[in-house]
Image: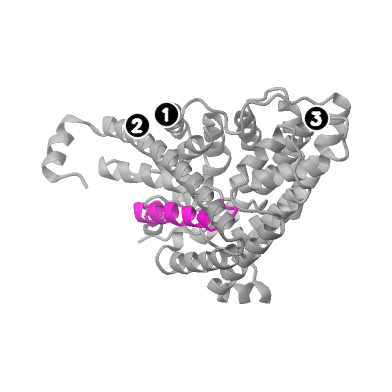
Amino acid sequence: MVPRSLDRLLHPIIGPTARGRIAALLGATLLSLVAIAFAKAGEEAQRAFGLLVAAAWWAPLIVTPLAFAGIVALTRAHWPEAKGSGIPQVMAAGRAPGATSSVRLVSLPVAGAKFAFTILMLLAGAPAGREGPTVQISAAIMAAVHRWMRVPVTTGVVIAGGAAGVAAAFNTPLAGVAFAIEELASAFEQRVAALVMVTVMVSGLISLGVAGDYVYFGAMSQQLPLRATILAAPLAGITGGLLGGAFAKALVAMAWSRHRAFTAIRARPVSWAFACGLTVAVIGMATGGQSWGTGYDATRSLLGGEAHSLLFGPARFVATLATALSGAPGGIFAPTLSVGAGLGQLLAQMFPRDEAGAIALLGLIGYFAGVVRAPLTAVIIVSEMTADRSMILPLFATALIADQVSAMVCPQKLYHALARQFAPRRA
C-alpha cells in the first residue's frame, strides 16, 4: 500500500491517466526482472538435479515422487490457484478482474507460490516449463503495481501483464502481442492493444539490457526443397495435431470428466501426484535422463540437425503428460516444444536426404500448435525463437493443419477449458 501521506501528496499532482501510464511502465520493468530471475533459478535447479543424479543414480526414485506429492499437497491446501500452467488463471482473471476470486488468481502470494513450487519441480527433475508460470507471475506483478498506484485493475491490465510475461520468458515481443490477441483476450479492443504493446516493449527492453540480445534456440537457417515441404508439412501437421490433441484431451478430461477413473483419481490427488512423480523418475532413469527438465538443450541441438535417441520424443511425451496430469505447478510450453522436436526427429527418418533440423522444426510447431491451438502465436513464437525466416510458409502450413486436426480430437481449446476451473466469483 502507498503510505497515506505520500498518497495524499501524489494524487493532486499525478492524475489518473498519468498514474496508469506510470503503473504500466513500472509493472513491465519489475515483471521482466522477475522473469529473468525466474529463468536463472530454473537453470540452476535443473543443474542441481543433474548433480544429484550423478552422485546417486537412484535418488530420483525417492526425490521425484515425494516432491510431486508434497508440492501438490501444499498447493491444494494453501494456494490452489497456483496449480498447473498459469495461463488459464490469467484468462479467467481477465474475464472479471474485479471479482474476489480473480484478485486471488493474480495476487502476489499466489505468484510467490507459483515461482517457488515451479523451481522445486525442476529441482526434482520434472519436465515442467517456466513460461506459463511466468505469465501468471507477470500478471500478478502488473496488477499489484496498479493497485499500489491506485489505478483500477482492468482486463487490459491483466492481459498486458500476461503478454509481457510471454515476451520476457522467450525474448519474443511479437509473440507476446500475438498471444494476447489469440489466447488471453476474448474481445481485443484498441485500448488493450496499446497497453499490451507498451508493456511488451518495456519488458523486452529490460530483458535485452539485462540478459542480452539472444535468440531462444539460437539463430538457425534451415531450408527444405519444395518436394520435401509438400510432403513433410502436412505429415508434421497431421501427426502433431493428433498427438497434441490427445495430450490436450487428457488434460481436459482430468479437469472435467465424470468417468469413474478420473473421479477416483481426483479424489486422491496426493497419491496420484506421487504415482506421476514415480512415472517421471522411472522414465528418466530408463532413458538416461532424456525426459527430465525442460529439454531445452536437446531441443536446440535437434533443431540444429544433431541426432538424439529416437526415444527422446516418446519419453518426453509420457513424462510431460504425467507431470501435467499431476496438478503440480509448472508450465507445458518448453516441454511441449521438446516433445515436438522429438516428433520431428522421428519424422525426419522418412526424409533422409533432407535437413533433419528443418523437419524437427516442423514437428515442433505441429505438436505445439496441436496442444495450444493457437497457430498464429505458434508460428510467430517459433520464428522469433529461431530467427529463421526461410521456414515461415512451411511453418504456417503445418500449424494450420495441426490446429484443424487437433480440433477433431479435442474440440475444446486446452487453456480455455482449463480456465473454467477458475471461473470468477463475485464478492
Q: Say which amino acid is labelled 1.
A: Val
Residue 297's place in the image compared with 416, above or below, is above
The colouring scheme, among rainbow, by chain, secondary structure or one colour, is one colour
Disc 1: CA contacts within 10 A as few (<14), some (14-19) or many (>=20): some
Q: Nearer the viewer, mark 1 or mark 3?
A: 3
| Mark sitting earlier along the chain (2/3) | 2
The residue shown at (36%, 58%) is: 100
**Structural distance between the alpha carbons of marks 1 and 2:** 8 Å
**Which residues fall within the magenta stretch?**
103-128
332 vs 106, nearest the viewer? 332
Marks 1 and 2, the one that precedes in the sequence: 2
For image coordinates 65% across by 36% down, the residue present is 300
Residue at mark 3: 355
Mark 1 and mark 2 residues within 8 Å of each other at the beta carbon? yes
Per the image, the residue denoted by label 1 is 198
Is 408 located above or below residue 196 in the figure? below
**Percent from the top left, x then y, of residue 280?**
64, 61
* Residue kind at label 2, given as amino acid type: Leu
Residue 94 seen in render: yes
Q: CA distance from mark 1 to mark 3?
A: 39 Å
Residue 297 placement (x, y as % from top left) = 62, 40
Instruction: Report, in whole angstroms, how far the alpha carbon at label 2 lies from the one at label 3.
Output: 43 Å
Numbered badge on residue 25: 2
- The quadrant of the picture occupied by the C terminus is bottom left
**Label 3 amino acid?**
Glu
Q: Is residue 398 shown above or below 285?
A: above
Residue closest to the eye, 103 or 50: 50
